[in-house]
Image (cartoon, rainbow, N blue to C red):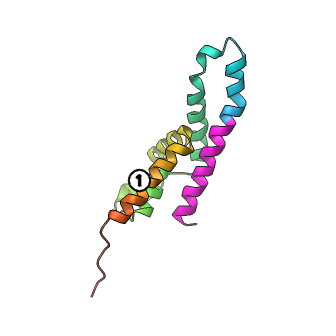
Amino acid sequence: MNVISLFGITFIVAFFVETLIEFIFGKLFDHIAFLTPHKWLQMYLAIAAAIGLAFFYRLDLLYFIGVYLEVDWQPFADVSIVGLIISGIAIGKGSNYLHDIIRFLIGLKHQLPKPEEPA
């Protein structure tokens, strides 16, 4: 599977987390008076769910970015726990957040110098 497909799957997971947390918990926080002052917890529920899914599906955005940008550096050579946690937090922030990151990376990749071909 190529890295662009993995970014796409990550977007879908982010969308599901965002919409399902809102669907499941949003109404509870809105309609149960005891929970209403704690609506801010909803963001942390989304992040916790997203970190769990990042580990389950091994969605490491730092690794994907390293592959996409062709980074030849050992820390980006494989999926890492730190990358999974950071990815889970990013996924928990939502698909708009990830979209901004992807737009930045596409612009960055077009600015990188191309490696010269050996003669």
The residue wearing badge 1 is: 104
Q: Quadrant of the N terminus?
A: bottom right
Seen at 61% across and 37% down, the residue is 49
Vertical relation: 28 (above or below) 104: above
| Camera-nearest residue between 63 and 99 | 99
The amino acid at mark 1 is Phe
Position in image of residue 8 (x %, y %): 58, 57
Position in image of residue 65 (x %, y %): 44, 57
Position in image of residue 108 (x %, y %): 36, 59
Residue 73 visible? yes
Position in image of residue 15 (x %, y %): 63, 45
Query: Is 111 displayed left or right of 4 in the figure?
Result: left
Residue 7 sits in quarter: bottom right
Span highlighted in magenta in the image: 2-20
Q: Quadrant of the C terminus?
A: bottom left
User: Please, which residue is most extreme toward the bottom here?
Assistant: 119
Seen at 44% across and 44% down, the residue is 82
Vertical relation: 8 (above or below) 26: below
Seen at 50% across and 51% down, the residue is 60
- Magenta segment, prevailing SS (helix, strand or loop): helix
